[in-house]
Image (spheres, coloured by chain):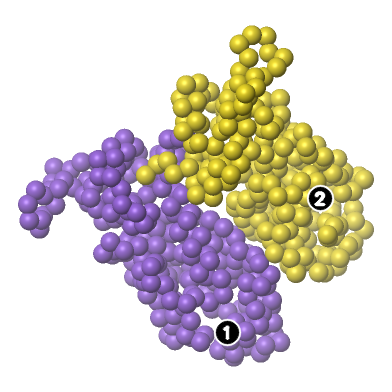
Chain colours: A yellow, B purple
Amino acid sequence: MRNTTLEKYVEYQPGLSIDCVIFGFHDNQLKVLLIKTPYENKWSLPGGFVPIDEDIDDAAVRVLKIRTGMEGIFLRQFATFGKVKRNDNHFGNAVLDHLKIPRETGKWLSQRFVTVGYYALVDFLQTVPQQSKKEELIEWVDHKEVPELILDHKEILDKALITLRNELNLIPVGYNLLPEKFTIPELQKLYETILDKKLDRRNFLRKITNIGILNKLDEKKSNVAHKAPNLYTFDKEKYDEVLKNGLNQGW
Amino acid sequence: MRNTTLEKYVEYQPGLSIDCVIFGFHDNQLKVLLIKTPYENKWSLPGGFVPIDEDIDDAAVRVLKIRTGMEGIFLRQFATFGKVKRNDNHFGNAVLDHLKIPRETGKWLSQRFVTVGYYALVDFLQTVPQQSKKEELIEWVDHKEVPELILDHKEILDKALITLRNELNLIPVGYNLLPEKFTIPELQKLYETILDKKLDRRNFLRKITNIGILNKLDEKKSNVAHKAPNLYTFDKEKYDEVLKNGLNQGW
């Protein structure tokens, strides 16, 4: 597996990078995995450049694996960002100076590079965030409390969230975000958090049940004072089928 | 406005192109605008390279304008294609030889370039397809009868169609595809053609009416034998509002 350092920059696809918006759900917060870079202490999305002999989708899988230890999870390309002014000399030079790469040698980093955005849904509790350099931090941040990000990373993050909200109308969401066993109120809370609005309890129950992806267990949630709610799991086979064919509501 | 010829190729963003899937609706067919290239007479999507000082979204607007004469119409980026093997020496050399550019000078064309896919919905009757070189043809082709395309353009076209089908669940579609005045059966036929399946008449009427984007006119369709159906227009203000905020069905 490749690493993401820049020392072999001549082998990278010119003018191209990827960025990953990695969502996790915990404490009723939709969290996003961010890196505190050594470059002016600004934060960034996890990402990297694309080796010349690597498919871009594979590059996203690699970054996700390196940063979370997770494989085979929900990961989708959602948009590509290619404004001329999205990166600039200032950022490029800060990176080059930090890496002690001569500015002339690494001047491609100051020219436009187009970035392909991916978003992933991961299990917060199973994820072990990995820093790739000792001078950086990697942390889960509530998506409502995101600090200033480098370049256009805030725009990329916002677009990923809009995409995720749209996806709720097209595919089931939750498999990688909730623990294996969960209650309907917990699932509803996930949807409410993503959509940032309250949903009607009965309506939600009816719609989520109609999709046919839930298995009701003979277990109730423990540690609950009274009227313990039932526990459910996703029927992974049916879940994957709906993920593939779409919710098919609508027309 | 720039043109799309390659002679100034040194000014292009390295390793990047865009491709446009331009849909039109006519004779109950969903048609796609294709170019018969001079390169081995294979067909391609309209597209081009991206000048180093042009935003990629602007490049798509430019290509659409050049190819259809149309501006300000529905145009969306939908996916980026970046497999290592998506282009190869064979195609690159065919283009270079045709343009009489030395292979060594233009070798970047034989290396991978990543392409950003856009799709557009245009009014078939208002579109005047434009060839950009005299050796090429540009034609509307029924999406079910697409000939062999260069590179991965078939994959790009298929993905655009899947995206369009998904969009029917998220936004209203029809404004750029139907004439200004249309009947509900015509609108239903458009949806059926895109989805490639029959829809229930009453169900469709109820759902499309509920969106609140239709104006019923005091006119009936002429040239119809008996029981002439009512004509409608889109309420453009409400249409644009729903386009912006989403259909908001679902949760």
Question: Quick one: SS at disc 2?
Answer: helix
Residue drawn at x 65%, y 19% as measured from the top left: A220
Viewer-nearest residue: B177 or A174: A174
Q: Amino acid at mark 2?
A: Ile
- The residue at 33%/44% (across/down) is B236
Letter of the chain that mark 1 sits on in the rendering: B
Answer left or right for A131 relative to A117: right
Disc number for residue B170: none
Residue denoted by label 2: A66
Which callout, 1 or 2, points to the residue nearer the camera? 2
Say whether residue A32 is visible.
no
Farthest residue toward the left? B226
| CA–CA distance in space, label 1 to label 2 | 39 Å
The residue wearing badge 1 is B95
Asked if residue A219 can be seen in this view, the reply is: yes
Q: 10 Å neighbourhood of mark 2: few (<14), some, or many (≥20)? A: many
Which one is nearer the viewer's eye here, B170 or A107?
Answer: B170
Residue B140 image offset from top left, x and y in percent: 36, 71
Instruction: Please state if B179 lies on the left or on the right of B131 as rendered.
Output: left
Query: Label 1 amino acid?
Result: Val
Label 1 Cα neighbours within 10 Å, binned few <14 / some 14-19 / many ≥20: many
The residue marked by circle 2 belongs to what chain?
A
